Image (cartoon, helix red, strand yellow):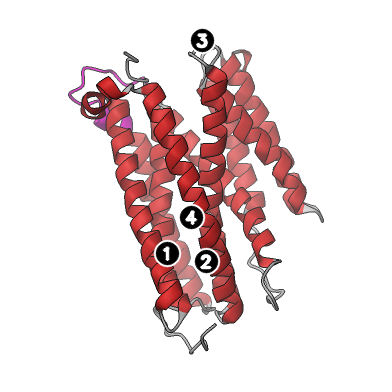
Amino acid sequence: MALIRPTDATDSPRRTGPGGGVGRAVGLLVLVGLGALVPLIGPSVAAHGTGEAAAPDSGAVALLRAVLFAALCVQVGELFVAGLARRVPAAPADRPGSWAPYAAVAGFAAAAAVGELAAHGHGSRAGILALLEAIAFAVAGLCALSRRPEHGVWPLAAVVLAEALRAHPPTEHTPLIGSGLTVVHLTCSALWAGGLLNVLRTLRRWGGGEAGAALLGLYARVAAVLFAGVTATGLCSSLRRMPSATALDQLTTTAYGRVLLAKVLLVGAVALLALWARTRLRRAPDPLTACSPARVEVVTLGVVVAVSGLLTALPLPING
């Protein structure tokens, strides 16, 4: 590997003083607030002019599901990056503070609220699955606080499975195939988005260096496979919901199709940012300059998570 030169203030992950920490916190709150507007006002905006009526609580459901997905990403990403960091030679023992317990609380609250908003509350199939998700988030939070946080992978896997079953009820055609696609899609998405977030947090904690470049390289190699998984399962799921004969028309004439199209465009932008970061990682004198496009990538992935929450709250297009 090429000699790592001292990085500058714009491209280097580094520790900052209290003032910098406050600025990042304020910036994060602003981004979260703006991101919350996507699921809150999205249903009415997406349905405008389609003749479809958004459900009264669709904005709340979309926001809660976006929170649920974000909580899953944070926890899965921490476990994923912890495993990658153990494979880095001479990796610093220093690690960023865990966000997993806070994410578990957010996921628990969101899942419980979604179950309460479901038809017939927690007595319905959707309500029972939401309750199971809430319990799984609670167990994952306890694992994150224990001496063996890696055990949290099992309750988080239960969240993914419950969400896949919720998205494909027994009344759907071939629900098991749909659930299988969702399991792979949601797992790859959580590893991709959550992994990048926690890689950047770890690099800032480590302050750069060869170990940081090695960690980013390990993540980049896995991320390419994750992107392929997200793309393939997303395409298959979309074709199941919108057959090829009507897909192009429904992409612009239905609320679901419009939001799906927006998600596809966002994922395309993320792919370009990832390619830019990968090019810098391979060719730049300092591989850690790849952190600049990676930061934009993780923000864009946050928007994708918000749009995904919105997508689950919209009526499915007519399959035919």
Question: Which mark identifies residue 200?
Answer: 2
Q: Secondary structure at mark 3?
A: loop
Residue 17 vs 50, above or below: the answer is: below
**Residue denoted by label 1:** 295
Spatial separation of the CA atoms under disc 3 and disc 2: 42 Å
Give the mark, 4 or 2, whose residue is nearer the N terminus: 2
- Horizontal side of 8 relative to 187 (left or right) equals left
**Residue denoted by label 4:** 224
Residue 273 vs 261, above or below: the answer is: below
Question: Which mark identifies residue 65?
Answer: none
Q: Position of residue 194 (x, y in %)?
A: 54, 53
Q: Residue at x 64, y 20 (%)?
A: 128
Give the mark, 4 or 1, whose residue is nearer the N terminus: 4
Check disc 3 and give the amino acid type.
Thr
Residue range of the region highlighted in magenta in the rendering: 42-56
Cβ atoms at labels 1 and 2 below 8 Å apart: yes
Q: Secondary structure at mark 4?
A: helix
Along the line of sight, the residue nearer the viewer: 19 or 81: 81
- Horizontal side of 46 relative to 27 (left or right) equals left
Spatial separation of the CA atoms under disc 4 and disc 1: 17 Å
Give the mark, 1 or 3, whose residue is nearer the N terminus: 3
- Horizontal side of 71 relative to 59 (left or right) equals right
Taking the view exactly as shown, the residue that stands out farthest to the right is 147
Q: Position of residue 6 (x, y in %)?
A: 48, 89
Along the line of sight, the residue nearer the viewer: 185 or 165: 185
Along the line of sight, the residue nearer the viewer: 81 or 236: 236
